[in-house]
Amino acid sequence: MRPAYPFDEAATARAVVDEHGVLVEWSEGARRLLGWAPEEVLARPAATLLADGARVGPPEEHRWSGTLPLRHRDGHAVSVWVLAHRQPADGGSGNWLVVCPLRGDDAPDPDDPLSQARLVQSPCAVAIYDDRLRLHAVNDAMAQVLGAPGERLRGLRLPEIGGRPESDDIEEHMLQVLGTGRGQDVRTYARSGDGGTSAWLARLSPITDADGRVRGVCVAVHDFTDQYRARQRLQLVNEAGARIGTTLDVTRTAQELADVCVPVLADFVSVQLVDPPEPDAELPIGPPQMPVALRRVAHRSITPAEPEALSAVGDSEVYPAASPQAVALLTGQAIVVAKASGDMEKWFAWDPGRVRLIERLGIHSTMSVPIRARGIALGVAVFTRFAQPAGFTADDVLLAEDVTARAAVCIDNARRYSRERETALALQRSLLPRTLPRTAAVEAASRYLPAARSRMGGDWFDVIPLSGMRVALVVGDVLGHGVQASATMGRLRTAVRTLADIDLAPDELLTHLDDVVVRMSEEAGGEGRPGEVGATCLYAVYDPVSRRCSLARAGHPSPVLVPPGGPPQVIDLPAGPPLGLGGLPFEAVDLHLPEGSVLSFYTDGLIEHRERSAEAGRRLLCTALAERTGGLEETCDRVLQTLLPGVGSTDDAALLLARTRGLPGSQVATWDIPADPALVAPIRKQALDQLDAWGLSLVAFTAELVVSELVTNAIRYGTPPIRLRLIHDDTHLICEVSDTSNTAPHLRRAKTWDEGGRGLLLVAQLTQRWGSRHTVDGKTIWAEMSLRDEE
């Protein structure tokens, strides 16, 4: 049970004087000392109690002690030693608490257990309090801590001696020791004279007599300020290691440095990085050229409005060689500028505006610490103090340099990562199609989304026009990340285009592409050692005339089909092995697609996420595709917003949407050709009549020559049956001649007296492009003429 307070308030003369020097409180002990009743002195100037014409002004310190001549009520002067504390108050300077102990002249009894507990010469500060918790005795070390002679303070309570809130807290613990007889340890923290925090450990022990009765409390005080501040510095270093460098973003890392150091180390911190001499140029090793351009990338202040910031984040300033920032970069050492030394105006004379800001805000110390890593001067961190009264100490400089050095490595890592990522992005974008070609077969739209927090990957997509108005749709994903993956992607995209030019079926094309990846893996691993090159791919060919689509995949996610008027559905397509395993077959599937069907091709980065499964992502994709509002571009945006809202993907993602078109039968004409050279002329006539019916008479002359040469070659070198087909849209006219021979034609240089050999050379000169493709029944020779060029 907590005992009642044993305090005798009349044992201390107490008075309170307000900031105007008027008495506002007068205790019973004060009446006993000077004889004045409270109603005789309250609301009157305290100076009227001074005897012999003495004059005392308000002390400049927060604590004062000394002997004063005071006037007794009966008229005689009383010489009194008093202790005064200024009590803090909001909005004003505060009142003064003036105390004086009342005690007799009897000296302490040497046999008293309180006196026996006294250790006068002990280096440990010790004070003895009686059972009324009034000071009985102190040793020399405690008198030095209290800042007054022990005999003068005898009889005062701890709050009357200390005058601080923490004194009341310690006295509360002393009261518990007095009541329970058990010792306690109390830690207390207070503002020190240098503006920092002082830390004390008070060990409270009961003092007992021979009979075991508690007769008082022994207070032993230990100053562990140095250990406390060292622990604070270590804590800041540990916190900096945990909080700085959480991302590979330069701006975020610089902001983390500023956030960690405010308000523990400074009131305002700005981080400024060196601008490279040229855009995208690498910073040189060693100090930069003077004057130096620094761009502010982060700052933090204890004041919300940040009035200390002369420039906004993102702004660049030029600093001359005489500025603290430039000197710090040149020397590689922290530069401390303090107003107390009188050199602040000299350091900042190059910028009068900065000098005026320093005067207006009361800035008294700045510290410029270079940000250096791997021999490169990256920038400067500037620490500023104006609210903390103390300037930067040598320990503060060491701490700032340690924290900044840790941040410098993180900033340099983020800078190098950003450069590599930008290089990979540039390479990726240069290898991906900038625009998708306009074809008569499909309307296409695409999106490529880089990974949010990882390096670049090797996702790609492509739309490749083929002969006969057909189109190839491709999407692929290379194993791994970074520049190497992007370069591999570029090689595979080129290989696919090359294989597409010879009009291979999807399963055959993937077989050849698998061989390419195997060779690339062998090259990457070296002789006798396989590398780690691998990829997945989906290849589809759509024919707008037959409206058939042939698809095959190599370990890639199946596409989603949205038929006109029907729900989205995942195409059941044989998975096939990923590219690079070698020797395994691929299987193609043929589908009939109504005009207006939407094919959705994508990479796994679109549907896979750490917070959901691939199947759940595929369902979200179908939900987004089921909403048919807007065109394909709006659909692409809706898909990304649905599957990767805000944060993006942990892997790069590619999306390709294609809406199929059908070529009307009225734009296609087909003839079966007898194997008789004498019938070439009637065939030319029928072709000309068809062109005239289509309104394409402007290209009739060229088309007639092409038809004549291709049909003649087929009759002469091919195998019946032979078929001629003309196809046109708004931009192109295509002539195709098919036969059942597998012999592919080729250009050759005819000699001067040769009667043949010039047919295909003539076709190549007259058409925009030409070629051949193998079919199930043989081959097809085709030539494409541009209608726009003719117009």
Image (cartoon, rainbow, N blue to C red):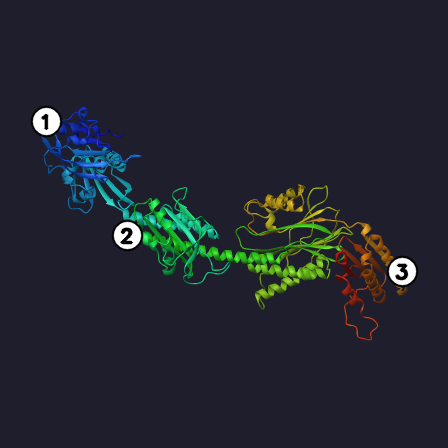
Picture quadrant where residue 127 is located = top left
Residue 420 drawn at (x, y percent): 52, 58
Element type at mark 2: helix
Which residue corresponds to the image point at 26% horizontal and 30% vertical from the top-left?
Answer: 2
Query: Which of the two marks, 3 or 2, is nearer to us in this view?
Result: 2
Can you say whether 45 is above or below 245 in the image?
Answer: above
Q: Amino acid at mark 2?
A: Ser
Report, in whole angstroms, how far the alpha carbon at label 2 lies from the one at label 1.
Answer: 55 Å
Which quadrant of the rendered structure holds the N terminus? top left
**In the picture provided, is 779 more to the left or to the right than 79?**
right
**In the picture provided, is 577 more to the left or to the right than 763?**
left
Can you say whether 538 is above or below 756 in the image?
Answer: above
Front one among 329 and 621: 329
Q: Amino acid at mark 3?
A: Pro
Tag 1 or tag 3, which sits nearer the N-term? Answer: 1
Can you say whether 126 is above or below 51 in the image?
Answer: below
- The residue under label 3 is 682
Whether residue 265 is visible? no
User: Badge 1 local density, few (<14 within 10 Å), some, or many (20+)?
Assistant: few
Residue 524 drawn at (x, y percent): 58, 64
Tag 1 or tag 2, which sits nearer the N-term? Answer: 1
Residue 661 drawn at (x, y percent): 74, 49
Which residue corresponds to the image point at 29% horizontal and 49% vertical from the top-left?
Answer: 227
- The residue under label 1 is 74
Q: Return the residue found at the far right.
A: 678
Q: Amino acid at mark 1?
A: Asp
Q: Return the residue found at the far top.
A: 39
Which quadrant of the rendered structure holds the C terminus? bottom right
- The residue under label 2 is 341
